[in-house]
Image (cartoon, helix red, strand yellow):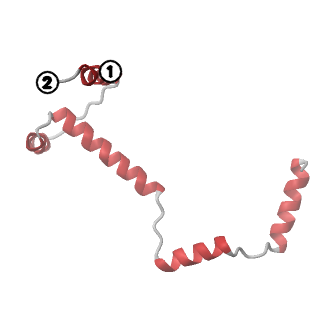
Amino acid sequence: MATRATQSAKTKQEHSKSERLEARISIEQKQLFQRAADIQGRTLTDFVVSSAQDAAKQAIQGHEMMILSDRDRKVFVEALLNPPSPSTKLRAAARRYKQNMGV
């Protein structure tokens, strides 16, 4: 039996769902999704939305995360810990920036 807090949270979640998403899929895709939903004991809608959300999070994480080889990681850390001295061009650019920004 659900507690009052659980019921309240569920009702709040249901009310916050105001957007609709529609998609045309093949019969085979629907059967596949339905079978997976049945195996997990979920509704088709819950399964599809949850799967899409997981895929979206994974795509975003893959885009935002940088994976370096051991060599690249060592070069990156070395550059952070022991940065090279600024070149003549970089010093001139910094000077122009300060003049233009009134710094």
Instruction: Please give the name of the residue rendered at 91% of the width and 53% of the height, measured from the top-left corner.
Output: 99
Near mark 1 (Cα within 10 A), the count class, few <14, some 14-19 or many ≥20, is: few
Outermost bottom residue: 71
Q: Nearer the viewer, residue 12 or 92?
A: 12
Instruction: Please give the name of the residue rendered at 84% of the width and 73% of the height, measured from the top-left corner.
Output: 88
What amino acid does circle 2 point to?
Answer: Met
Identify the disc placed on residue 101: none
Q: Nearer the viewer, residue 42 or 92?
A: 42
Q: Secondary structure at mark 2?
A: loop
Who comes first in sequence, dot 1 or dot 2? 2
Image quadrant for the N terminus? top left
Instruction: Please give the name of the residue rendered at 30% of the width and 46% of the height, measured from the top-left corner.
Output: 54
| Residue pointed to by mark 2 | 1
Task: State the image quarter where residue 35 is shown.
Answer: top left
Q: From the viewer's perspective, is 88 left or right of 51?
A: right
Q: From the viewer's perspective, is 35 left or right of 100?
A: left
Residue 25 in picture, x, y percent from top left: 18, 39
| Residue pointed to by mark 1 | 12
Near mark 2 (Cα within 10 A), the count class, few <14, some 14-19 or many ≥20, is: few
What amino acid does circle 1 point to?
Answer: Lys
Distance from label 1 to label 2 (Cα)? 18 Å
Residue 78 in picture, x, y percent from top left: 62, 76
